[in-house]
Image (cartoon, rainbow, N blue to C red):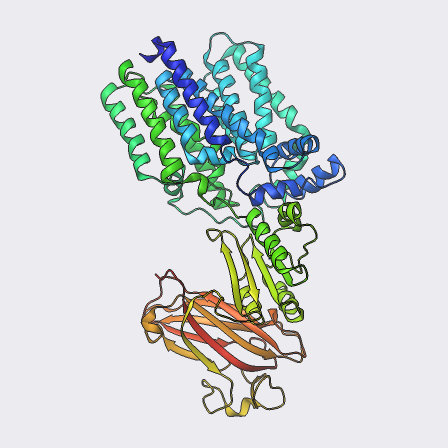
Amino acid sequence: MLSKNHRVENRLFWIIMVVAAVLRFNHYAGWSLSNDELSALNRLNFDTFSEMIRQGVMLGDFHPAGVQSFLWIWTKAFGNEVWVVRLPFVIFGIISVYFVYLIGKKWFGITTALFAMAAMTCLEYPILYSQLARPYSPGLLFSLVTVWFWTKIVFDKKKGFIDYSGFTIFAALTAYTHHYSFLFVVVVGLTGLFFLRGRPLRNYIFSGLVVGLLYLPHLNIFLYQFGIGGVGGEEGWLGKPEPGWIIGYLEYAFNDSLMTVLIILTILILSLIRYHIKFTKYHFLSITWFMAMFLIGYFYSILRNPILQYSILLFAFPFLLLFAFSFLNRIPDKFSAALILAFTVLLAIQTIFINKFYHQQHFGEFRDVAHQIACWDKELGRGNITNAVSVNAPFYIHYYLDKENQGITFQQYENRGGNDLLELTNIVQQSETPYFSFGWTKPCPPEVDEIIKAKYPCIIANKNYSGLSEVKLYSHITSDSCLKGPQQVAAYFNDFEDDDLWGGLLSQLDSLHVKNGKYSYMLDESVEYSPGIEIKVQQINRGNFNKIVVSLWAFSVDTLKNMPVVITFDNPEDGNYIWATSKIENFTTPGKWGQAFFVFPVPDEISPSDEIKVYIWNVEKARMYLDDFRVAFFTEYNLR
C-alpha cells in the first residue's frame, strides 16, 4: 500500500499543498470585495471596540463577533487594502486542506486522505470561500481542528491535556466564528457521548462545559440576534429551500460539472465493488455529520427562518469528500500516485480553464462600478454628470471610488422602490447636467431606468456584470452613438383626445387638469377601474415579448394612498393567474403632474391564449387625473 512508501506519499502531499496555495493565492486580491466583505469593513467604522461590538455586531449583523473583532484588530494594524483584508482567510483555507489530509489519513488511510485533499484543493467551492474575508474559511479550519482533537480524545488509547485543551479551544473558536460551524461542532460533540465511558467521558464532558464557559461573554449577543428573528433573520432576503435543494447544492459543490460528479461516483462505486471494505464507524460518522448539517439547516429554514445556503454546508463538506473516497485504500501502489495526480490535474484544469473560475463574476461588482464612474467623471468633467447609485451604504462605493477619484458625490445612495422612486424622479427632473450616471450593486426597481430615460433618453455606456451589478451613463441628447435597447414590438397609447377611450366614459373627460392636449381622464368616487387595454398574448408579436412597460401622467389634489397600476394575465382554464402592480403614488406629488412607470418582466409560463389586461385600480375611490397612458411591449435579447 502507499503508506509503505513515505517518499511517494510526501511528494504527493507537498504537490497538492503547493497547488492548494497557488489556487487560493492566485487573483485573491484581484476581484472586487463582495457585499458581505464591504459590510464587515463598514461595520468597523466606530470609535471604540465596545461601540463596534454593539453597533457592528449585535445590532448590525447576524454572525458571532469573532471575525469582526479579528478584522478590527487586523485592519487597525495593517490597513484595509483588499490583499491585506483577505490574506489571513486565504491562509486559513490552505491550512484547512492540510487538516482534511490529517483526518482522512487517520480515519481511512493515506489514499483516501490524498484524494479528499486533492478535491478540497481544486474544487471551486472551497477555493472561493477561502478567498472571502468572511467567517467561512476560519470556521472551516476551526471545525476541522476540533474534529482532529475530538478523534484523538474519542478513539486514541492515549489522550492528554493537549488533546482536551485543543478540542476545547477550537470548539470555542467555532462558536465565536460562525453559528453553523459551532452547530457542527455541537453535533460532533454529542456524537462523542456514544463512544466514551468512565474517566475519559468525565473529562470529555468537562471540556464541553469549559467550551460553554468560554462562550458566556458572547451569549447576550447570540440571544439578542436570535430574539430579533433568529440567526437567519437578515431582512428576510433568503427564501425557503425547495425540496430539491440538495441536488442543486451537490451540482454547485462539484463545479457544476456532470463529469466531476460521475468521476467521483465511479470511484466510490468501483472501490465498493472491488474491495468490499467493511463499513466502519468512520464511514458512519462522515456521512451522518454531513447529512445532519443539511437536514438541520433544511428543516430550520422551513419551520423558522431560512438559513440554508451553500456557504454554511462548507463546514461539513470535507466529510462528504472523505466518505466518497473512503473505500480506496486497497488500490495497488503502482496505480495510486498516478491516479491521484491525474485526478488533481483534471480538477485543476476544469476549475481554471474549463469553468474559468478566475474570470467568473461570483458576486456583485463594486470595484469596476466605481472605476467606471471615476473614468466618466475624469473624461466628461466634474460637474457635467449627476450621479446616483443603489448600494447598502455609501461606504460600499466610496471604498473603491475614493482611492482613485476623490470628491465624487451621489444624489442618491439607495433605491428600494417606494418613496425612493419619487426621490429619484425629483433628482432627475431638477438635474441640469448633460449626463446622468446610475449604478447598482443590489437589486433595485426596473422603473429606475425609465425614470432616468424620461429626461436622459440616450444610454451612451452600459456595463453589466453577469446580472449582479450594473452601471450606466445617460445623455439628454440622442444620437447615432446611443446604445440600442430592447426592441419594441407593440405599443398602445391613449391621450384621451379622441373617441377611443379604452372602455372609459365620455363623462369622465376633464379639460381643467390636463398634461398635454385638451383632455385628461378623471378617476373619482364613481370610478373604480380606469380605461385600459385588453388583448390576447398571441396578438402581440405572436406572443414573442418578455417585457411590458407602462407609463402615464397623473395629477392628484390630495395625497394618494393606494392607486395601483395593474397588469393581469387571464387564462380560460386557470382564470386570473398572474397579478402584478405598481403604485402611482411612488411617482407623484399632490398638486403636480408626475410621470409614473411600471416595468414588468413577463414570466416564461404565459400562454398564447392568455388575455392581458392593463388598467388602474382606484381602490380608495380617490380623485386623480390621468393623461398620456401608454403600454409598450418589448423583446429582450434572450427570448424564451
| 297 sits to left or right of 452 | left
Q: Position of residue 361 (x, y in %)?
A: 47, 45
Query: Looking at the image, which is closer to me, 396 or 501?
Result: 396
Count the marks: how many?
Answer: 0
Q: Position of residue 167 (x, y in %)?
A: 55, 19
| 78 sits to left or right of 30 | right
Q: Position of residue 41 (x, y in %)?
A: 64, 40
Query: Looking at the image, which is closer to me, 145 or 12?
Result: 12
Vertical position of residue 325 compared to residue 457: above or below: above
| 506 sits to left or right of 281 | right
Does the rendering let one see residue 90?
A: yes
Measuring 68% from the left and 79% from the top, which residue is drawn there?
A: 591
* Quadrant placement of the C terminus: bottom left
Measuring 40% from the left and 15% from the top, which residue is drawn there?
A: 11
| 333 sits to left or right of 498 | left
Which quadrant of the view contains residue 474?
bottom right
Query: Looking at the image, which is closer to me, 605 or 88?
Result: 88
Vertical position of residue 98 compared to residue 626: above or below: above
Measuring 39% from the left and 20% from the top, which residue is drawn there?
A: 113
Measuring 52% from the left and 60% from the top, which residue is drawn there?
A: 461
Q: Position of residue 415 (x, y in %)?
A: 60, 59
| Furthest residue in direction left, as rendered | 274
* Quadrant placement of the N terminus: top left
Vertical position of residue 411 compared to residue 47: above or below: below
Does the rendering let one see residue 572?
A: no
Which quadrant of the view contains residue 544?
bottom left
Vertical position of residue 533 compared to residue 416: above or below: below
